[in-house]
Image (cartoon, grey):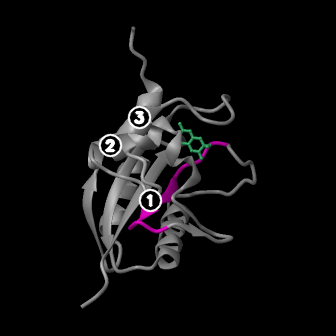
Amino acid sequence: MKNKHTAYIGIGSNLNEPIQQVELALIELQNLVDTSLVKRSTLYRSFPLGSANQPDYINAVAVLNTDLSTIELLNQLQAIENKQGRVRSGEKWGPRTLDLDILLYDNQQIETERLSIPHPGIYERAFVLYPLYECVPDLILPNGQKVYDLLKQFTSTKS
Ligand code: ROI
């Protein structure tokens, strides 16, 4: 029997019909070898983080059950990005047709040249935390933080 892992994938696009880009990416994720799509969020429109001089993003999160290792999964995600016309311009926080990030992989914490898991943006990006919360409301990150608690930074209440 194979080793099944749970991977959370962040999906983002702000070029060339972003909604279709994200929906197509979800189909590609569904078709990945040795992998099943367990859950997907709805689509979220968000203001660009980074250069403000770019279109709004469409963001979503997918939950995968996979036999792929982190590196195998990363290679597969980059192949999907490339297939959907991703051009690596060198501009760090510029627009992109498709961005697929491994947000979480089981409860693992990984720091290598190619991979930082959990994804470093997970703690403070509304466009990641809201769709994550939609998929798994009681999700706890490897450092013990609850996604629900992290979401509170985006809301305020009158006292
Ligand atoms: N901004 C938003 N809103 N959504 C993204 O997915 C996204 N991805 C990026 C940068 C350029 C940091 N900004 C983003 O890579």
Foreground residue among 92 and 16: 92
The amino acid sitting under disc 1 is Pro
Evaluate if marks 2 and 3 touch, with contact meaning CB atoms under 8 Å apart.
yes
Does residue 110 lie above or below 150 as drawn? Answer: below
Residue sitting at x 24%, y 91%? 1
The kind of secondary structure element at disc 2 is helix
Residue 127 position, x and y percent, is 46, 38
Q: Residue extending furthest bottom?
A: 1
Residue 144 position, x and y percent, is 42, 53
Looking at marks 2 and 3 on the same chain, the residue that comes earlier in the sequence is marked by 2
Which residue corresponds to mark 1? 142
Which of the 4 image quadrants contains residue 26? bottom left
The kind of secondary structure element at disc 1 is loop
| Distance Cα–Cα, label 2 vs label 3 | 8 Å
The amino acid sitting under disc 2 is Tyr
Evaluate if marks 1 and 3 touch, with contact meaning CB atoms under 8 Å apart.
no
Residue sitting at x 48%, y 32%? 46
Question: Would you call the spot at circle 3 few (<14 residues within 10 Å), some (14-19), or many (20 or more)?
Answer: some
Residue 38 position, x and y percent, is 24, 62
Q: Residue 151's mark?
A: 3
Task: Inspect the magenta stretch and tell me whether residue 115 lies in it.
Answer: no
| Ligand 1 - quadrant of the structure image | top right
Q: Residue 133's mark?
A: 2
Residue 118 position, x and y percent, is 51, 59
Residue sitting at x 34%, y 55%? 62
Give the extent of the magenta segment. Answer: 94-108
